[in-house]
Image (cartoon, rainbow, N blue to C red):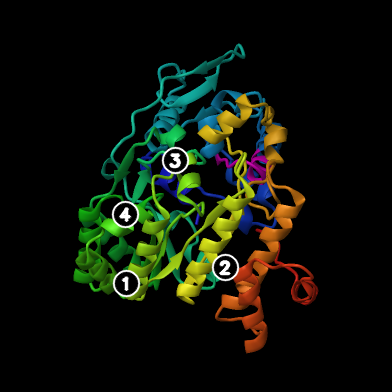
Amino acid sequence: MPLALVAIGSHLDPTRFEVVIVDGRLEDDPIGRLDAALEGALCLGVTVLTGAPLKDAVAVSRAIRRARPTLPIIWGGWHPSMFGRQCLTEPAVDITVQAQGEETFAEICDRLASHRSMDGCLGCTWRDQAGEVHVNPPRPLRRLDEFKPHNYRLIPVERYFDLKGKRQLDYISSQGCQFRCAFCADPFVYERQWVGLAPERVGHELAECWERYRFTDVNFQDETFFTRRERVDAIAEELIRRKLPTTWAGTMRADQGTRLPETSLARCRQSGLRRVLVGVEAGTDEMLRRIKKDITIGQVFETAERIRSHGVAGNFPFIVGFPEEPDESVRASLDVARRLRAMSPDFQTPIFYFKPYPGTSITEQAVRNGYQLPSTLDEWSEFDYVGSVGGPWVSPGRFRTVERFKFYQQLGYNRSTIATRWIRAFARWRCERQVFSAPVEMAVARRLWPAPALS
């Protein structure tokens, strides 16, 4: 669900502004639908991610600028938060919003409605009528309890349920992250700050949404849901007290998992906790120190054992291919992933390739060492940070090894695999010894079941 747009739209005064959200993924003719909705509009706001979504944002903005030359176009989201000035090299974009956007966008709309300049509007970058770009000071991070509740009536919730194949409600209860991971843009955008809704408000809002939508699962889209133990306890108590018949999933760091009391974990499970996402990222303590993850492999396995004992599923993602990462580190990551998968059929260990995402300290160091980042919006629109291709520091041999491991891990450990017991056993043997030569099974499977394209 496009929760960023829901958050921005919900905070506007409904007695003054009519909010229309157009999700291009749901439309046969997104630009036509958008143009029709913009008749008489005050402005167009676009949420922008790096990569292919950026290409869509440019195309949409240019099309609307041609159709409505005087309509102000505002970009927000992750990419404008990091490249607010660069985004304004696109003539179709007038204003960019940095970081938390609810209050900033509301002020922009107020100023546009009264024909006032953006001078002094905190948290945005803008171009004046003479073409000069102005970078305003950042806006302090506000407490989420000061914002209005998300108005899910702004989006076709049932349509998202149908597309998901389950009645799962996406929900954000906090923003930001206090940690310093060197591969993540959060420290750059939020400056290691974190704000969360009060537990009572979380319980009240979810209860109201359940009365309206009868969802069966809540997916907390927080960067670090388990940041405050007392708050997690209180949210679990709210769900239990209100007797909401729903499961839920959230994000947890490995060090948070080791510190969480047994009573807290038990209450979370009682309230419906079904799965946690625990970022592992690397397979050795040395590499974890290099990327400033501030956890240990021991904490990963301790957390895994604790959630398993409570019947909670786990998703443990890894990243391989960091700059100057030795082969031994990659092999260690694959081994840790295998050991986690072997602990429980309810554990998943997806493996991604490091991509030099803007705003991260590893990327900044790579640039100092000679790596060239994209320098234009068109180049950034070709930046692929989610596809299954190796990054700049992944050799062809390393890429083959990782891809084959991913295949045999799925074949050997997945519950739903159609493979026979002997094929599964052989796949596990390959993973244990990291022997992936002559991958006949992989070639046959790829031919019979091609990988689905990403949305």
- In the displayed structure, would residue 357 be above or below residue 403? above
The reply, left or right, for residue 117 in relation to residue 53 is: left
* Disc 1 packing (10 Å; few <14; some 14–19; many ≥20): many
Residue 53 on the magenta segment = yes
Q: Nearer the viewer, mark 4 or mark 1?
A: 4
Q: Nearer the viewer, mark 3 or mark 1?
A: 3
Residue 380 on the magenta segment = no
* Disc 2 packing (10 Å; few <14; some 14–19; many ≥20): few
Q: Secondary structure at mark 3?
A: loop
Disc number placed over residue 163 in the picture, else none? 2
Q: State how far apart marks 3 and 1 are (Cα).
A: 32 Å
- In the displayed structure, would residue 14 be above or below residue 218? above
Task: Determine the image quadrant of residue 83.
Answer: top right
**Front-most of residues 352 and 333:** 333
The residue located at (61%, 58%) in the rendering is 26
Closer to the chain start, of discs 4 and 1, is: 4
Residue for badge 3: 292
Task: Determine the image quadrant of residue 368.
Answer: top right
